[in-house]
Amino acid sequence: MGAPIVVHRPSPSGGRRVTASGQILGLAYDDHDLVEFLRRAGLPDAERILDDPGWIEWRGGRAHQYEAA
C-alpha cells in the first residue's frame, strides 16, 4: 500500500492537488499550504512528515516544487 497522502503533479497554472485516502484536501502552492491542509486533516505535526515516504508520496515532480514545469 502506498503513502496515505499524495501530492500530485504541478498543474499548468501552478500549485499541486493534495489528496488523502482519495479525498481532495486542496491545492497547495507551497509547503505552508500543504502543512495547513494536513493539520486540518488531523495531523498536528505535519511539517515533520513532508519528507517521509511512509506518509507522503510526491507524484509527477520534485518534492517541494509547486510551479508548473
Image: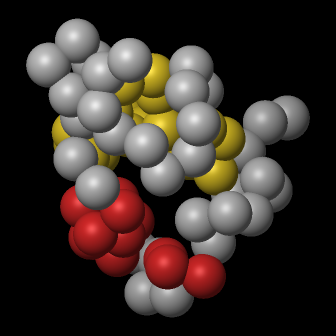
Residue at the image point whose x is 68% and y is 63% from the top: 51
In the rendered image, residue 22, in percent from the top left (x then y), is placed at: 47, 29
Regarding residue 4, the answer to whether it shows in the image is no
Q: Quadrant of residue 58?
A: top right
Q: Along the horizontal axis of the image, is 34 left or right of 45? A: left
**Farthest residue toward the left?**
13
In the rendered image, residue 60, in percent from the top left (x then y), is placed at: 56, 20
Which residue is at the front of the view, 34 or 22?
34
Q: Along the horizontal axis of the image, is 21 left or right of 68? A: right
Q: Quadrant of residue 49?
A: bottom right
In the rendered image, residue 47, in percent from the top left (x then y), is placed at: 49, 79
Which residue is at the front of the view, 31 or 19?
31
Which residue is at the front of the view, 5 or 59?
59
**Farthest residue toward the right?**
1
Residue at the image point whose x is 14% and y is 19% from the top: 13
| Image quarter hosting the C terminus | top left
Rendered view: 37 above or below 57: below
Residue at the image point whose x is 23% and y is 12% from the top: 12
Rendered view: 18 above or below 69: below
